[in-house]
Amino acid sequence: MVLEENVIVGRRIQIRAVEYEDLPALVAWRNDPQVYRFFYEHEPLSMIMQKAWFDRLLQKSDEKFWIAEEITGGQAIGTVGLTHIDWRNRKAELSRVLIINEHRQRGLGSELVCLVLRHFFDHLNIWSLDKRNRANRAWFA
C-alpha cells in the first residue's frame, strides 16, 4: 500500500475520496436490485437524496467513504467505507463494500478490503473492527 496525494494505492486498485462528480454513478450502483438488497435502505435513490446524503457525510467525523478505482485506466469499480468510527476507543465498522457487477469474481473485493484495513490499522490508528454489522460478520466470520 502506498499513500499518494489523496489516493491510497494497492496492487490493482486504489481508493480516493468521493467527489460530487461520482454521485450519478453511486445512484446507479445503489439502484441496482443486485446491490440494494444488501443495504439497509431498500428504496430507490434519487440524485437529490444522494446529494443530501453526501452533504451530511462531509460534515461527519465518524465516517469515511471512498471510491475504488482500477489503477490501469482509473475506472471507478466500487466503494468502501468506515462507519461508527470511535476515535477515543480506536474502533470502527467496515461498511459499504461494493464492487460493481462487471468487476466481480476477480478478487478485487478482497483486495479492496485488505487495502482499506491496512489504512485503517496503520494510518488511522484504529485498533479494532466492530463486527456488529452484516458486512463485517460476512467478511470476518
Image: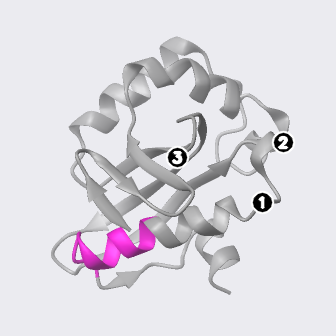
Q: Is residue 9 magenta?
A: no
> What's under tag 2, amino acid-wise?
Gln
Is 121 in the magenta?
Answer: yes
- Above or below, 69 against 128 in this view is above
The disc at residue 71 is 3
Q: What stretch of residues is rendered in magenta?
A: 116-126
Counting the numbered discs, the total is 3
Task: Give the structural element (helix, strand or loop) at label 3.
Answer: loop
Disc 3 to disc 1, C-alpha distance: 14 Å
Q: Quadrant of residue 6?
A: top left
Q: Which mark is residue 106?
A: 1
The image position of residue 89, as x and y in percent, is 21, 81
Residue 122 percent across, percent down from the top left: 27, 78
**Circle 2 residue:** 34
Residue at the farthest front position = 72
Amino acid carrying label 3: it is Ile
CA distance separating discs 3 and 2: 25 Å
Quadrant in which the N terminus is drawn: bottom left
Local crowd at mark 2 within 10 Å, few (<14), some, or many (≥20)?
few
Element assignment for label 2: helix
